[in-house]
Amino acid sequence: MKKNPVKVIGIGGSLGSSYSTGLAALKCALEGAEKEGAEVKCIDIAQLDFPMYAEMEQNPQHIVDFAEEIYQADALILSSPLYHGSVSGLMKNVLDWLEVLHGKNPPYLAYKPVGLICVAGGAQALQGINAMEQIVRALRGWTIPFVVPVLRSWQIFKPDNSVTDTKVLQQLYSLGKEVKIAAERFSNP
């Protein structure tokens, strides 16, 4: 009996620029998961039309659908730019909307492995990783121990989709592979 492939959803991107190095890094990690046989989907959060999170009696249907898609995925990869020592407000808002999943059984991101990427213009990308790890833990997800902080991302990811640092590219592929393997282990203990 053939098993369905692991489904890995990547969430990333940023506003204000025609080119997102965080989205470029995310696509590389998803490519690493796909090379290992995962089914992947990339969600560019700059394209989502989410209002600022607020508790509502009736949540917008497109947000409910988004949350359900995330819930059904076997694993996630998150990629955020570093803004003032943390994740972008856009990423935080998207993750806040996962509150829609609170009534599920299990709730939120329980038993879901999550890979983390943070891109920075300078040398402090690990701060964004740490912030995302706390958010994922609050949502009951399981972060992959291997993370990829990308320093000076503007030098590594070019608008023509080229990657100038093969070591970073290999790290992103490795992250995708580890997320896929963790998802398989979680689904087949």
Image: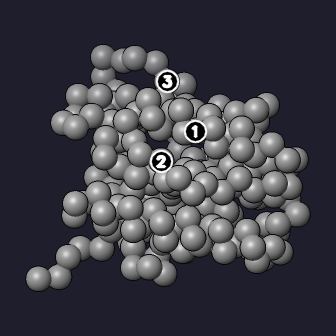
Residue 155, position as x, y percentages in the image? 88, 63
**Residue type highlighted by circle 2:** Thr
N-term mark: 3 or 2:
3
Residue identifier under label 3: 53
N-term mark: 1 or 2:
1
The residue sitting at 35% across, 49% down in the picture is 112
Marks 1 and 2, Cα distance to the nearest angstrom? 9 Å
**Residue type highlighted by circle 1:** Met
- Determine which of the numbered discs, if any, sits on residue 3 in the image: none
How many other residues sit within 10 Å of disc 3, few (<14), some (14-19) or many (≥20)? some
Drawn side of residue 59 relative to residue 128, left or right: left
The residue sitting at 23% across, 73% down in the picture is 4
The residue sitting at 22% across, 64% down in the picture is 188
* Quadrant of the rendering where the C terminus is positioned: bottom left
How many other residues sit within 10 Å of disc 1, few (<14), some (14-19) or many (≥20)? many
Residue identifier under label 2: 143
Which one is nearer the viewer's eye here, 137 or 23? 137
Marks 3 and 1, Cα distance to the nearest angstrom? 17 Å
Which one is nearer the viewer's eye here, 54 or 119? 119
The residue sitting at 79% across, 48% down in the picture is 120
Q: Are marks 1 and 2 in contact (CB under 8 Å)?
A: yes
Residue 38, position as x, y percentages in the image? 39, 73
- Element under label 1? helix
